Amino acid sequence: MHSEATRISPVLVELQIEVPWERIRHDLDSAFSELQRSARIKGFRQGKTPRSVVRNVLGKQVKRKVTASLVREGLEVAVREHELHPVALPEIETPTIRQGDPLMFSAKLEVRPTIEDIDTSSLTIQRKVEPVSEDQIEERIKQLQRHQADLVVPEPARPAVLGDLVTVDYTVVVDGQERPDLAASDRQIEVGSDQVRPEFTAGLIGLVPGDIRTLTIPFPHDDPAARLRGKEVRFDVTAKALHERVLPDIDDEFARDCDFETLAELRADIRKRLELLAESRSASGLREQVVDALVQSNPIPVPPTLVQQEQQSIQRRLKLLRQSLGEQRAADEPLPDGLAARAESKVRAAILLGELARRENLDVTEAEVDTKLEQIAEQTGKHVAKVKADYQGERRDTLRSELLEDRLLEYLLSRATIREAEPGHDPGQTGQPGEARDTEAAGVEPSTDDSGKEAG
């Protein structure tokens, strides 16, 4: 087989491949010989069908099969010969076998770009560790105080006020039709909670058990609940119970309820945990920065197909996230500003990190994977044999990839210039990891369809 490669762009190569007639004839003869032994053709015993009959009956099928096999082999040989690294299926002009002629075809391949050099000498990043403030400690203590509060019926009885917990049943009517899928019973809602629509909680103020109140709430045209956008939704609410929180005093007894001997010990533990969290955020920020710096210092071209695949992956993750929050979006909605560019940057980073691992001989051995599995077993309290059994096949490969990524990032950080940043507010690091505002309207449970948080 003979092949020639023409680089159309840094990430696109066209191959011209030629298979000589002698090879084609050999493969055709082999295919027909095999069929002659195995084919079942009406009027002939198996293995006794004349070659000419096999050719007439199954000739087109055999030629298609031989063509596909030769095209596949020709591509594999050409890719090895020209040391290409394909990243997507090729575009091929399907050839046709003609008696006595070589089989000639072309294929376009998206390939990993050739990287002459990777610059890791100019990586400059900033380390920022936000100091823990007394306000943060106080806020955490207040959260614990709230968690330890007793829920009691107000004495003497009174109407609901901000901060109370009202237990309600409600039905929902949209466009004159009752929606049982959005109704709720025995739902406890805090008056004034930012996790429930403000119009709904405002309507709970002044209720006493036994009251029935109708709330009509207009939903905006851009509301996440797709089927309720631009509609007025009626809630028929029945108050069933009312409780208030009685907060404990913040003292040593309160600390003992939190498993500490003194309030001072509780405060010290909270400070330590917040400092560890700040250090973790700082380390995570350094890892992100050093990869971004690597990408900016090495503006290599990237294959469009890989970028498209990453964009689709981001869209799938966004869809799952939105569904978990009760939001619905059009399937063909474009990526939010910045995320499309982020997909390209992520692909570029993956290519650079892969090449860096090859050049610096950075790898993870099977023994190192086993050591990590032993650590996981110790942390989880499971027997190491059970953990190793759980991490087989693809899951073990994923763990190995994670360990290799850690090693690559350690290498990059060792090469980077790290400057200490001035402490200050960073909008990108507010809130707790994994924290998400519960946008459910009137306490409706999260759902993966439009019925999710549409109510209220």
Image (cartoon, rainbow, N blue to C red):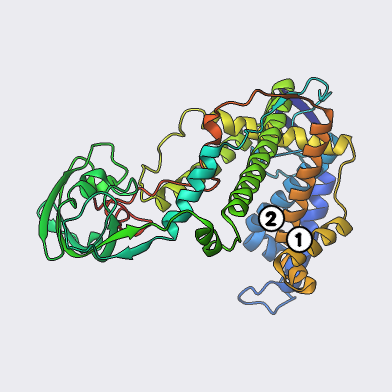
In front of the other: label 1 or label 2?
A: 2
Identity, as a three-letter code, of the amino acid under mark 1: Ala
**Circle 2 residue:** 65
Q: For mark 1, does the 10 Å Cα neighbourhood hold few (<14), some (14 to 19), or many (20 or more) residues? A: some
Is residue 109 visible in the rendered image? The answer is no
In the rendered structure, the answer to whether residue 191 lies left or right of residue 356 reads left
Q: At 79% from the left edge and 19% from the top edge, which residue is drawn?
A: 122
Of 411 and 44, the residue lying toward us: 411
The quadrant the N terminus occupies is: top right
Q: Are marks 1 and 2 in contact (CB under 8 Å)?
A: yes
Q: At 72% from the left edge and 70% from the top edge, which residue is drawn?
A: 381
Residue 333 position by quadrant: top left
Q: At 73% from the left edge and 63% from the top edge, which residue is drawn?
A: 379
> Mark 1 vs mark 2: which is more N-terminal?
1
In the rendered structure, the answer to whether residue 58 lies left or right of residue 190 reads right
In the rendered structure, the answer to whether residue 48 lies left or right of residue 159 reads right
Is residue 231 visible in the rendered image? The answer is yes
Mark 2, secondary structure of its residue:
helix
Tell me if residue 269 comes above or below residue 103 in the rendering: below
Q: For mark 2, does the 10 Å Cα neighbourhood hold few (<14), some (14 to 19), or many (20 or more) residues? A: some
**Circle 1 residue:** 31
